[in-house]
Image (tube, grey):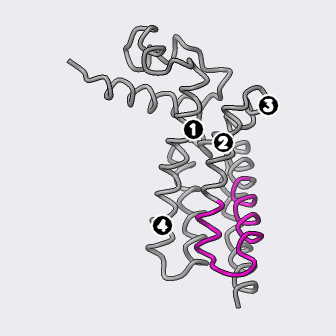
Amino acid sequence: MVRRTDTRQRMLDSAAELFQHQGYHATGLNQLVAAVGAPKGSLYFHFPGGKEQLAAEAIRQSADRLCDQLRTIVANSPDVVTGIVNVVEALANALEESDFQRGCPLATVALDASGDSEVIRQACADGYTAWHTLISEALNTEKAGQLATVVLAAIEGGLLLAKTLHDTAPLRAIAPHLAATLERELS
């Protein structure tokens, strides 16, 4: 028998995947429960707040996972500037490997539903704040907050353009410019 936590986690994983691909509104409850082979009632058992609660928790999980991946990439790089360039490269590679289906795990939902749901907007905001904090702490300079905003905005814009155009060139183009800006600001 599948344990309760296993079903709950599978629902979170499936929801994160579906929301990243399709957005919040295009993902139906029947599709969510069918993806894990569970009855519809199990969604409300594990997520009494329904689809909105499931979405918020899936967003937080996705944000945490990406934050961990970014932290690892930066930590395994010789310096923070190279780390950020390596993050851009890893995101571009992941986008290509998914045939341009998987961009930012927050952006699709943030654009689709954050105006309709404060719970979802806050989950997306928390994710972006965590990424901003990670970048800011890695930069470790007086201007770290401003520079982290520039880095995050450039990467998000690059991901959006790359996904829309089915071409990672816009995303890859930001890497040398971010590197030049950061090297200038950090010296």
Give the CA separation, mark 4 to mark 3.
32 Å
The residue at the point 66 percent across, 54 percent down is 129
Q: Residue reaching furthest left?
A: 1
Residue labelled with disc 3: 115
Tell me the kind of residue under disc 1. Ile
**Residue 59 badge:** 1
CA gap, disc 2 and disc 4: 22 Å
Look at the image and give the residue range highlighted in magenta.
132-156
- The type of residue carrying mark 2 is Cys
Q: Percent from the top left, x then y, of residue 177? A: 74, 74
Q: Mark 2 points at which residue?
A: 124
Question: Quick check: 141 above or below 128?
Answer: below
Please say if the residues under marks 2 and 3 sit with CB atoms less than 8 Å apart: no
- Percent x, y for residue 79? 54, 82
Rendered image: mark on residue 73:
4
- Left or right of 145 on screen, residue 55: left
- Amino acid type of the residue tagged 3 in the rendering: Gly
The residue most toward the bottom is 187
Q: For residue 151, which numbered disc appears in the image?
A: none
Look at the image and tell me in which quarter the N terminus lies: top left
- Along the line of sight, the residue nearer the viewer: 154 or 41: 41
In this rendering, is residue 16 above or below 66?
A: above
Question: In x, y percent, where is residue 3?
Answer: 26, 23
Label 1: few (<14), some (14–19) or many (≥20) C-alpha neighbours in 10 Å:
many
Labelled pair 4, 3 in contact (Cβ < 8 Å): no
